[in-house]
Image: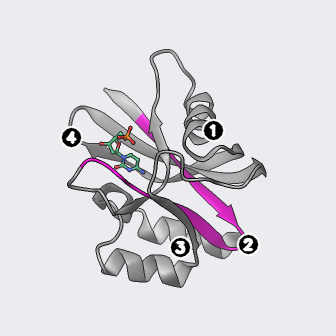
Amino acid sequence: MKTVVAAAIVRDQKLLLAQRSYPDDVAGLWELPGGKVEDGEAVSVALEREIAEELSVRIGIGRGVGEPVVLRDNLILVARHAWLVEGEPVAVEHSAVTWVSAGELGAMARAGELVPADAVWLDDLVALLGES
Ligand code: DCM
């Protein structure tokens, strides 16, 4: 079982979403950016590495958000609260990045614009935005 870790990067009560460019079935949908944890790598180290690669920023990492989601292919997806420490996000591997409020996130979820695994965390993400 491999772990995929994603970042719920929050700033000013908005959540950073990144638009997938591949594969075809999820291209155009929005996700929390992240990626696979390498063998022997700590989850937080993997998340810092993936976010630096994908968005060209450094982040701080906090607690887990929501429950782990089991994906196909023996992958388990987890999310962590995060915040920017250095830089402004750039879509290096994604089609675009955007910041959304809790209301906008809910509307995107209802419209089916989030990747399915991440949509499971809607209530947790809305709660996180309310706290920040
Ligand atoms: N994934 C996901 N939600 C995320 C990040 C990743 O569902 N926020 C899934 C998509 C892929 C797998 O995890 O099945 C690996 O992601 P990637 O293709 O970005 O390496």
For the view shown, which residue lies furthest in the right direction?
86
Q: Nearer the viewer, residue 29 or 1?
A: 29
Q: Nearer the viewer, residue 87 or 105?
A: 87
Indicate yes or no: mark 4 CB to ligand 1 under 8 Å.
yes
Residue 120 at x, y percent in the picture: 35, 62
Residue 56 at x, y percent in the picture: 65, 43
Closer to us: mark 2 or mark 3?
2
Circle 2: element type: loop
Q: Residue at x 55, y 31 (%)?
A: 43
Mark 1: which amino acid?
Ala
Residue 14 at x, y percent in the picture: 63, 72
Q: Give the prevailing secondary structure in the magenta stretch.
A: strand
Circle 1: element type: helix
For the view shown, which residue lies furthest in the top direction?
40
Mark 3: which amino acid?
Val
Q: Is residue 112 above or below residue 60?
A: below
Mark 2: which amino acid?
Asp
Q: Is residue 73 above or below residue 15?
A: above
| Label 1 Cα crowd, 10 Å radius (few <14 / some 14-19 / many 20+) | some
Q: Earlier in the sequence, mark 2 or mark 3?
A: 2
Displayed quadrant of residue 39: top left
Q: Which mark is residue 52?
A: 1
Query: Does any portion of residue 75 appear in the rendered image?
Result: yes
Residue 74 at x, y percent in the picture: 24, 31
The residue beneath circle 4 is: 72
Residue 92 vs residue 84: left or right? left
Q: Which mark is residue 126?
A: 3
The residue beneath circle 2 is: 12
